Image (cartoon, rainbow, N blue to C red):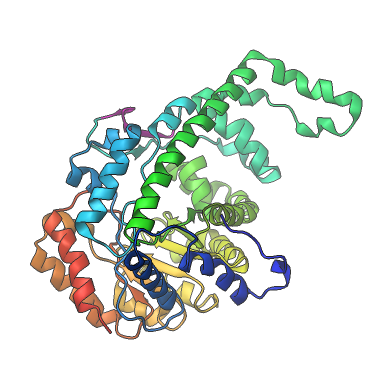
């Protein structure tokens, strides 16, 4: 957890970032050995150097493995979500065997929590999917086309009273939640509380409390895993929390892809107003996550801003202004936005580069974007990585993997400010290719 210094309000952005990085660089944990502690600090400093566009001792190789952990350890995807002891053992084994410099797959998702809440927006192994596959989104319109005004007027109320009862079966009773401003006067409080006495509302809160207990169980397992990865192996975690682009909150979660694309033509001003209203919430999401974990890096996966989803004109009108405002709001609090740029952004690079975002305050991980073009557009103001293709991990050879890693280091890694990473989360990989990815970067990426 991050503890704010007393003079926080008077600090500059640079000082805030340093204050947040300090406990991540030197965590207050009990390391098993001095070697593990030294390794942790070297690895963390390497990422800080890259963030600040300095030349580190060598190129950091950021791993990004998910389902590959299950495949390698022969633990089912279902067990990773429901049997936390197996999950911890699998994650620790994966890291011991491959010896990455950073936590490659530190998290496992809590199937018990999703069951308790009756989550409708995804399917996962144990809930409609086979045991040997990862989760999938079940996209549909959880917000109707005529509900933009409600979202804009009060996003939190809309989310709690409208979206969540639709998305979580166990919380259906929250449709009846009263307006809490009913507590402003003493005689009004019983009338405000009357709906809470209704059985559907009581049932929803009982499920909510049970979900809290399920979360506590999961957090305990996460802590056991983290203690071994950090204290035992000296592996820094490179993600401290998540946020989203405001447009993606609407397009991914609320309206769905098909509906939001129609909205761009049928009610474009409503879409823009809703995105603008969600900016402070997206900023708060990132900051609160960082505060809770004490890790200053907030991952922001970018979805519907990719080249294939909208034109450049639409990107500049609907997507980028509020994403930029979110990035700036997160930076203002010393948190480091880490954009996971999914798909291709070849058409977007110059738009982003011309936006005057502050130097040395963001990280960009690209999926299918031409990396030399990224270097030319971003190299003097932001660190970047990515574009090790996911198919190469599964269908390539170790020699092909090594050649690709060397090519990236040679062409875009020469001046620092560069980290190696896959372009997507890796679910399927041959062990020898994962070794080639990690080992080649370690041996060839020395400056």
Residue at screen point 24% across, 78% down:
445
Is residue 27 one of those drawn in magenta?
no
Q: Nearer the viewer, residue 128 or 258?
A: 128
Where residue 295 appears, as percent x and y from the top left, is 49, 59
Q: Quadrant of residue 206?
A: top right
240 lies above or below 89: below
Drawn side of residue 333 relative to residue 75, left or right: right
Residue 352 in sight here: yes
| Majority secondary structure in the magenta region | strand
Residue 347 in sight here: no
Where residue 71 appears, as percent x and y from the top left, is 19, 44
Instruction: Residue lying at the far front in this picture: please name it.
Output: 33
| Quarter of the figure that contains the C terminus | bottom left
Residue at screen point 32% across, 71% down:
60
195 lies above or below 165: above
Drawn side of residue 223 relative to residue 433, left or right: right
Q: Nearer the viewer, residue 342 or 14?
A: 14
Where residue 191 appears, as percent x and y from the top left, is 82, 21
Q: Which residues are magenta?
A: 120-129
| Quarter of the figure that contains the N terminus | bottom right
Where residue 425 appears, as percent x and y from the top left, is 30, 54
Residue at screen point 41% across, 37% down:
139
Is residue 123 one of those drawn in magenta?
yes
Q: How many badges with numbers are in the image?
A: 0
Residue at screen point 46% across, 45% down:
252
Q: Quadrant of residue 204?
A: top right
Instruction: Residue lying at the far top in this picture: please name it.
Output: 199
230 lies above or below 41: above
């Amino acid at each position: 957890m991050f503890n704010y210094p007393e003079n926080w309000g008077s600090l500059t952005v640079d000082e805030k970032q340093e204050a947040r990085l300090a406990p991540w660089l030197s965590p207050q944990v009990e390391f098993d050995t001095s070697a593990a502690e030294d390794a942790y600090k070297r690895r963390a400093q390497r990422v800080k150097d890259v963030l600040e566009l300095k030349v580190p001792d060598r190129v950091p190789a950021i791993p990004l493995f998910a389902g590959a952990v299950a495949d390698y350890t022969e633990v089912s995807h279902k067990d990773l979500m429901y049997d936390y002891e197996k999950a911890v053992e699998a994650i620790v084994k994966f890291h011991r065997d491959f010896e990455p410099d950073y936590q490659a797959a530190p998290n496992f998702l809590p199937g018990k929590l999703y069951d308790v809440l009756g989550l409708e927006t995804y399917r996962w192994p144990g809930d409609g999917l086979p045991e040997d596959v990862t989760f999938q989104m079940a996209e549909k319109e959880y917000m109707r086309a005529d509900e933009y005004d409600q979202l804009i007027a009060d996003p939190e109320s809309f989310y709690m009273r409208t979206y969540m009862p639709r998305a979580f079966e166990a919380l259906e009773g929250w449709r009846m939640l009263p307006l809490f401003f009913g507590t402003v006067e003493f005689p009004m409080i019983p009338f405000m509380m009357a709906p809470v006495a209704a059985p559907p509302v009581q049932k929803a809160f009982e499920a909510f409390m049970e979900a809290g207990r399920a979360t506590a169980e999961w957090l305990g397992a996460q802590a056991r895993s983290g203690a071994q990865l950090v204290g035992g192996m000296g592996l820094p975690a490179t993600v401290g929390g998540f946020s989203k682009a405001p447009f993606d909150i609407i397009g991914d979660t609320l309206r769905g892809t098909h509906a939001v694309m129609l909205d761009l033509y049928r009610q474009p001003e409503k879409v823009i107003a809703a995105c603008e209203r969600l900016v402070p919430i997206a900023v708060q999401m990132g900051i609160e996550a960082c505060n809770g974990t004490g890790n200053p890096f907030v991952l922001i996966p970018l979805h519907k801003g990719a080249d294939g989803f909208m034109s450049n004109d639409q990107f500049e009108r609907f997507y980028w202004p509020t994403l930029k405002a979110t990035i700036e709001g997160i930076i203002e609090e010393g948190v480091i936005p880490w954009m996971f740029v999914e798909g291709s952004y070849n058409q977007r690079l110059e738009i982003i580069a011309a936006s005057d975002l502050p130097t040395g305050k963001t990280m960009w991980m690209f999926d299918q974007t031409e990396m030399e073009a990224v270097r030319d557009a971003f190299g003097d103001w932001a660190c970047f990585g990515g574009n090790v293709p996911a198919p190469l991990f599964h269908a390539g050879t170790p020699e092909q993997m090594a050649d690709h890693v060397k090519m990236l280091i040679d062409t875009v890694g020469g001046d620092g400010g560069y980290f190696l990473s896959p372009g997507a989360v890796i679910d399927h990989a041959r062990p020898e290719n994962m070794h080639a990815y990690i080992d080649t970067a370690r041996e060839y990426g020395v400056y």
